Image (cartoon, rainbow, N blue to C red):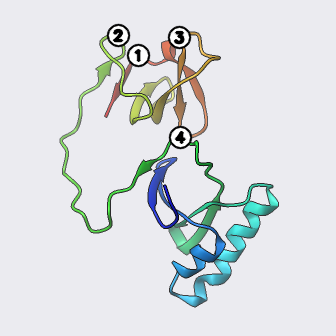
Amino acid sequence: MGPGCAFTWQDHVWTRATLDQALTATPDRRAHPRVLAAYLAATQRGLPATAFRWASGETCVAERVDPDVLVYPAEPAGSPSPVLAPEAWVQTADRFPELGRSVTIDTDAGPLAARLLLSDEASGGAAWHTARGEHLDVDEVSRWRP
């Protein structure tokens, strides 16, 4: 996704942008110091930022999101979100979700947002990657829902 494109990553909507593009996309000049601070923080972690988002409390967050990281295009602002009925749990013995699709998995700790991704280290060739950064073996999750 090119500069200025909105995408979903780690359950948040981000905008692909370098520092100058992020500043241009932030029309309120009073917010520019927060954008600079976010990009500086990312650089100090050794990861020059390639995307940013505004979090609660008007906090700017900048992160490095490499081009090979699996992301999804965000819905255009103002587009109506469909109202979905609560989804029933699907047993993993019956079927798995599409690889990389964000779903809710049922764990001992309760429901968690996760994606099923290919993994050479996993016994079944795939592992659940939760939004909290945990990796669970396919056999550790008995059911999921969209």
CA separation, marks 3 and 1?
A: 14 Å
Query: Residue 71 at what x, y percent from top left?
Result: 48, 46
Which of pointers 2 and 1 lies earlier in the amino acid sequence? 2
Instruction: Calculate the distance from the C-alpha at mark 4 to the C-alpha at mark 3.
Output: 21 Å
Q: Please tell me whether mark 4 sits on a helix, a strand or a loop.
A: loop
For the residue labelled by badge 1, is the local secondary structure a helix, a strand or a loop?
loop
How far apart marks 1 and 4 lie (CA) works out to 18 Å
Residue 142's label in the rendered image is: 1
- State yes or no: discs 3 and 1 in contact (Cβ < 8 Å): no
Q: Which residue is drawn at the image coordinates 77% and 62% (left, top)?
A: 43
**Residue underneath mark 4:** 131
Label located before the other in sequence (2 or 4): 2
Left or right position of 32 against 114? right
Name the residue located 54 percent from the left edge and 74 percent from the top edge.
58
Residue 73 lies, with reference to residue 108, above or below; the image says below
User: How much space separates mark 2 and mark 4, taking CA atoms?
Assistant: 23 Å
Residue type, mark 4 in image: Ala
Mark 2, mark 3: which one is toward the viewer?
Answer: 3
- The residue carrying pointer 1 sits among few (fewer than 14), some (14 to 19) or many (20 or more) residues within 10 Å by Cα, namely some
**85 is higher (above) or lower (below) than 92:** below
Quadrant location of residue 99? Answer: top left
Which is nearer the N-term, disc 3 or disc 1? 3
Mark 4 / mark 3, whichever is N-terminal: 3
Mark 3 neighbour class, 10 Å CA radius: few under 14, some 14 to 19, many 20 or more: few
Confirm or deny contact between disc 1 and disc 4 (CB under 8 A).
no
Instruction: Tell me which residue sits at (64%, 57%) in the image.
Output: 63
- Residue at which label 3 appears: 124
Residue named by callout 2: 93
Above or below 90: residue 133:
below
Q: Secondary structure at mark 3?
A: loop
